Image (tube, grey):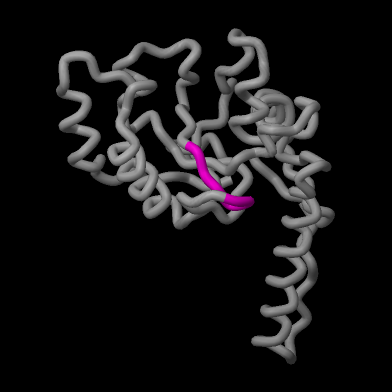
């Protein structure tokens, strides 16, 4: 999971929000594209939750806009607030089983009263400090509220999306690169 440092909102969103009947659902596609481009830029084209590579186009890397305060429980002003938006991956949202969804697709499939994150906040790095990764790629936390956010709300160990396998591969590639750059030093594979 990544900490997101918000930048200035796109002028197009600011201008749209000032219109009398502005709504997130009614946002014009050109404004939404500017918002998405800005979110992708500030996040380095990574999903705010699972860190998969994402982009603004179609296909398997397509991104969507997620609201930190879920739309189901937020006001229109909160839905249009750029500081409430992040870019996330598709999350396998067209899967038949909710157990095969992750990120906001999983969170959005939960009953309304369970969608709010208990502790994890991608805008506050302190809430991410309790997140750990095991050598097999599992993401977890010893803090029950953080672990609940990671696994129940976001399903970040989703087998259908092979998220653990991808994290394990990334860790192994990093370990190999470090050993390549420093051949005379033993670099252990870190276990958490």
Q: Is residue 75 magenta?
A: no
Residue located 28% across and 38% down the image: 31
Instruction: Say above or below: 143 vs 7.
Output: above
Left or right: residue 19 compared with residue 121: left
Give the image quarter of residue 92. Answer: top right
Q: Does residue 126 appear anywhere in the picture?
A: yes
Apparent side of residue 174 relative to residue 62 in the rendered image (left or right):
right
User: What's drawn in magenta, residue-wise?
Assistant: 59-64
Q: Going by the picture, which residue comes out furthest to the top? A: 113
Residue 12 vs 73, above or below: the answer is: below
User: Residue 188, position in %: x, y?
Assistant: 79, 71
8 vs 150, nearest the viewer: 8
Count of labels in the image: 0
Residue at 33% x, 41% y is: 35
Task: Determine whether, in the image, residue 42 is placed left or right of residue 20.
Answer: right
User: Mostly what secondary structure, the magenta segment?
Assistant: loop
- Please tell me which residue lies in front, 2 or 46: 46
User: Dividing the image into 4 quarters, which one contains the N terminus?
Assistant: top right
Residue 14 versus residue 73 in the image, above or below: below
**Residue positioned 73% across, 31% down in the render:** 151
Q: Position of residue 85 (x, y in %)?
A: 40, 33
Q: Is residue 149 left or right of residue 76?
A: right
Residue 150 appearing in the image: no
Viewer-nearest residue: 133 or 59? 59
Residue 176 occupies quadrant:
bottom right
Q: Residue at x 34, y 36 (%)?
A: 29
Q: Position of residue 19 (x, y in %)?
A: 16, 21
Q: Position of residue 21 (x, y in %)?
A: 22, 14
């Amino acid at each position: 999971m990544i900490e997101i440092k918000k930048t200035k909102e796109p002028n197009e969103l600011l201008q749209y929000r000032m219109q009398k009947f502005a709504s997130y659902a009614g946002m014009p596609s050109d404004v939404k594209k500017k918002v998405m481009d800005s979110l992708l830029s500030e996040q380095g084209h990574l999903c705010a939750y699972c860190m998969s590579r994402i982009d603004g186009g179609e296909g398997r890397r397509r991104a969507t806009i997620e609201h930190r305060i879920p739309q189901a429980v937020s006001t229109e002003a909160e839905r249009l607030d750029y500081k409430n938006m992040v870019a996330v991956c598709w999350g396998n949202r067209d899967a038949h089983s909710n157990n095969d969804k992750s990120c906001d697709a999983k969170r959005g499939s939960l009953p309304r009263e369970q969608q709010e994150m208990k502790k994890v906040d991608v805008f506050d790095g302190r809430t991410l400090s309790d997140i750990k990764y095991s050598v097999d790629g599992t993401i977890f936390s010893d803090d029950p509220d953080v672990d609940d956010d990671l696994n129940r709300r976001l399903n970040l160990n989703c087998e259908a999306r092979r998220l653990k396998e991808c994290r394990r591969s990334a860790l192994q590639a990093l370990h190999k690169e470090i050993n390549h750059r420093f051949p005379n030093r033993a670099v252990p594979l870190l276990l958490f």
